Image (spheres, helix red, strand yellow):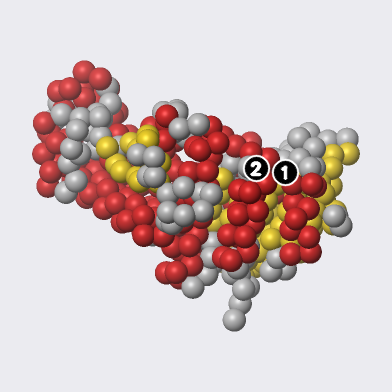
Amino acid sequence: MVRVGVSALALSHFRSHRRTRLTFDSRLVAIHGPNGAGKTNLLEAVSLLSPGRGMRRAQAEEIIRKPEAIGWRIAADLSGHEVELRAEPGQPRTTLIDGKSSPQIALAKLARVLWLVPSMDRLWLEAAEGRRRFLDRMTLSFLPEHGEGVLAYEKAMRDRNRLLKDGVRDDHWYDALELQMARHGAAIHARRLDALARLAAAQTDDGPFPAADLALIHPDGAAPATEHDLRIAFARSRPRDMAAGRTLVGPHRADLVGHYAAKNMEARLCSTGEQKALLISLILANARALKAETGNAPILLLDEVAAHLDAVRRAALYSELSDLEGQAFLTGTGAELFAELGDTARHLRVTDADGTSQAEDYTP
């Protein structure tokens, strides 16, 4: 049976990595080094082995190493398949699987990838867009077709918004676009609720990572959920939308709210440490649910997560990751953060030499 995960990774002119080649076994991967050395760039490369723009949501052009600017390449052995991603200056990213050009969504058939990065620490405090993206990423991990549905909905909405801004009043144009938006929008809403149900079933009430109660809300109250109701809502909202120059109803306006279940407290009102623990709890629940459904744990990318945990929670996290028996990459500035892992992890040290990242094995 082929192990799900990355067994080899080669980077060429990818951000700070001019040439980096690494191999991995079944152990956790603990990566340490100073800020700016290129640790997160390794995790970003792995995140791109999944549909979408990766953990930084970067455009292909932004990833190209400077000053050479000759394009970048990622080559990986992913779950027994040869995967190559590359982008030339001014060109979009291309994906090859076993030498054949493939759509990005095909990567989801090889492995599921989840991540937790420092920019998500304020998830419960900032705008709804980030929470929708967080939920959609988890939904995508369960239902890979969700990504294409979201893209189709957003494309139709952009076309509708263009009509609104131009003051077009021809109902036939709106009817056609709203039919597409309603069909995809109803499916988006249903898949999000499906993902929330799976997460709820996979959470635990005991331990240092508290369970979170999650729900979808809409700024106008009860959101239209069916294709029929969405078509009516879009049609009724045209005058208001035209005044605003954008679509004001639909799943793109939904928000994810979370509560610390044991305290019955909104996540946004919790302490910084509690908010972080809730996020970790959700990522672990997502991983447990995927393993229960597919037989394989997802690849987990946890950037600078250990530094914000006390010794008890850090030990609990490492225990959970070990129990999942999947592949996980963790980063931190100091080797001491991973000392308790011992030889149960592959330890790497990343350093910077004149703007070029270097990765080497490290024995704690």
Q: Is residue 34 left or right of residue 216?
A: right
State the SS at label 1.
strand
Q: How many marks?
A: 2
Of residues 92 and 226, which is closer to you in this image?
226
| Image quarter of residue 99 | bottom right
**Name of the residue lying farthest toward the bottom:** 1
Give the numbered dot on residue 246. none
Q: Could one spot residue 231 in this view of the protein?
A: yes
The residue to which callout 1 is attached is: 332
- Place of residue 123 in the rendered image (x, y in percent of width and height, measured from the top left): 47, 34
**Residue occupying image coordinates x 58% and y 66%:** 323
Q: Could one spot residue 87 in this view of the protein?
A: no
Which amino acid does the dot numbered 2 rest on? Asp
Give the numbered dot on residue 310. 2
In the displayed structure, 4 sits above or below 122; it is below
- Place of residue 73 in the rendered image (x, y in percent of width and height, measured from the top left): 69, 52
Of residues 356 and 307, which is closer to you in this image?
307
In the displayed structure, 233 sits above or below 209; it is above
